[in-house]
Amino acid sequence: MAVLRTTRRLLRAVRSYYANRRRDALLRDCDPRMLKDVGLRWERGKLVPINPERFAPRSGAVAASSAAPGAGESPGEVCPRCGASLA
């Protein structure tokens, strides 16, 4: 059973890898303004969402909202555009 599960996961990973490559190849010719309308941008040769916090896992969002105010990072410590921590 473990071999079958591993094989399925491997095939799913290969399928998604090639689907993502195909998607990226189609979007490579798009104008940056058009990508912005869709909510994407190119960063160091990789297609990334403009608002990465929108696609964050729900478990992190629930944990952050249930924490006491001021326990996590304040909004001023995180870049609202890319989500990177500010120095």
Image (cartoon, helix red, strand yellow):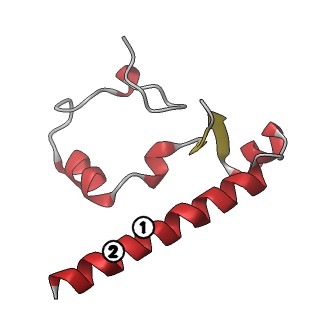
Depth check, front residue: 79 or 5 = 5
Residue 23 location, x and y as percent?
68, 60
For the residues bearing labels 2 and 1, Cβ distance under 8 angstroms: yes
Residue 70: quarter of image: top left
Question: What residue does disc 2 label?
Answer: 9
Give SS at disc 1: helix
Please report the residue visible at 38 percent of the width from the left and 28 percent of the height from the top: 75
Left or right side of 47 for 57: left
Q: Amino acid at mark 1?
A: Ala
Label ID, residue 75? none
Find residue 15 and report its horizontal and vertical position in percent: 51, 71
Quarter residue 6 falls in: bottom left
Kindly identify the amino acid type of the residue bearing the numbered disc 2: Arg
In this rendering, position of residue 26 left or right of residue 22: right
Label 2 vs label 1: CA separation?
6 Å
Q: Which mark is residue 13?
A: 1
Task: Pick the quarter of the image with the N terminus.
Answer: bottom left
Q: Position of residue 16 (x, y in %)?
A: 51, 67
Residue 37 x %, y %: 76, 48
